[in-house]
Amino acid sequence: MIDPQPLQTKGSQTSQRDQQWPWWPLLPLYPYGKRATHFEELIPGQVWSFEQLQGVYYVAVPIRLTVVKVPGGLMLVNPLPPTQELRKGLAALEAEHGPVNAIVLPTASGLEHKLPLGPLARAFPDAELWVCPGQWSFPVQLPLSWLGVPAKRTKILLTDGVPHPEVCQWISLGPLDLGVGRFQEISCLHQPSGALVITDALVGIHSKPPAIFDRDPTPLLFHARDRGDQPLSDSPETRRRGWARLVLFASYLRPHCLRVPAMAELLRYAFRPGLRSWKAHFGVYPFDWQDGWQEDADALMGDDEAKVQVAPVLERLVLPRAQQAITSWLEQLESLSGLTWVIPAHYSAPLSFSTQQASALRTEIQQKNWAPSQENWEFLSGIDQQLLDLNVVPKNPFFKG
Ligand SMILES: [Fe+2]
């Protein structure tokens, strides 16, 4: 396992201004208009990571733009909002490795990856843009041109070719019919580094909170508490505890061990002295964690290495009737020569991942009870059932022919 190194951006001092992102109302997620970016070199001289946080009500997980070295410069995969801080980091890499010559949006559906494409494209006017086929958005269908993506230099992955085929091999997961649009993700095996750059297909979750929280651990400390009148106290233990709960929220949306207290109970502990601030949400903490939450969180996280898995939201909401799509994608990975790492767009990276690990994960998925409906899965299952009842999603997501 490579120990990721913080990337020094030469001669640059990060200011609050550099972290501003004025377009946050387009997708109003925490941390809204101020986004810190965390830089790491993942594979020396070959692959770099730029992470920001994204979420709702302090439930924030890292979202990543991956930079890979390609002939003539750099390729960006999975767009992020180009704050000044991010642009300075990319400029430092360009000075050493050459200009950004390609920007890739490898997913058809992920709005959080799609919205930053336009602004990022404008920051690099000479780069070629590549997007996954079948772009869509829900509930409002937004054409890419409305999102500020310049049509003239945009190409469709696979249909119009692929960027840098001399060093990259491109593999498709899907397409699947989600009713409102398609699910598809095009992964890139960057041969010089052995890194497979993906978007949402897999995640690897570590029990140690991601380094980006060192900038501002408030979301971790906020959720580490049991009641709203407890102060936000900082220690390695409270950070881990808060992180474990964030992982449960992000994985299951409403985890099984979570009770939402009645309003009267909430207000009894709210507005206490020392907590009358936005940061502490005025002492309102509308969650009551029941016994068993730690064990549930432990099952999702690895201590020595990040635990590689299909994210429960993807399994239960996007692919509940398409287990075969993920297993045939893994089968394709099993024949990739040189596969060494997976770099997802969320949580930890790089994840050590060989063809043997791809095969073992495929067997595990084939043997497990895919997309269950009990306990932690109940809430996700309820959403899926509602979508089925409303005929929003089809029973059979596989395209015919
Ligand atoms: Fe995503």
Image (cartoon, rainbow, N blue to C red):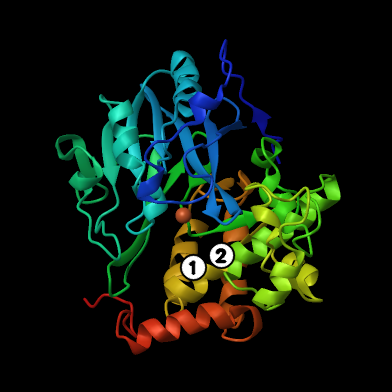
Which residue is pictured at 31% across the width and 82% down the height? 394
Query: In the picture, which quadrant includes the N terminus?
Result: top right
Disc 2 is placed on an element classified as loop
Instruction: Give x and y (percent) for residue 19.
Output: 51, 30
Residue 43 placement, left or right of 137: right
Q: Which residue is mark 2?
A: 311
**Picture quadrant of residue 385:** bottom left
Q: Which residue is mark 1?
A: 314
Residue 352 placement, left or right of 343: right
Which residue is pictured at 59% across the width and 83% down the height? 369
Label 1 and label 2: CA atoms lie apart by 5 Å
Q: Residues within 10 Å of mark 1 (few under 14, many from 20)?
A: some
Query: In the picture, which quadrant includes the C terminus?
Result: bottom left
Q: Looking at the image, do the residues carrying marks 1 and 2 touch, with CB atoms under 8 Å apart?
A: yes
Instruction: Give x and y (percent) for residue 177.
Output: 30, 73
Residue type at mark 1 is Leu
- Cβ at disc 1 under 8 Å from ligand 1: no
Which residue is pictured at 54% across the width and 40% down the height? 52
Instruction: Give x and y (percent) for residue 350.
Output: 61, 43
Front-lying residue, 325 or 79? 79
- Using the image, determine if residue 214 lies above or below residue 183: above
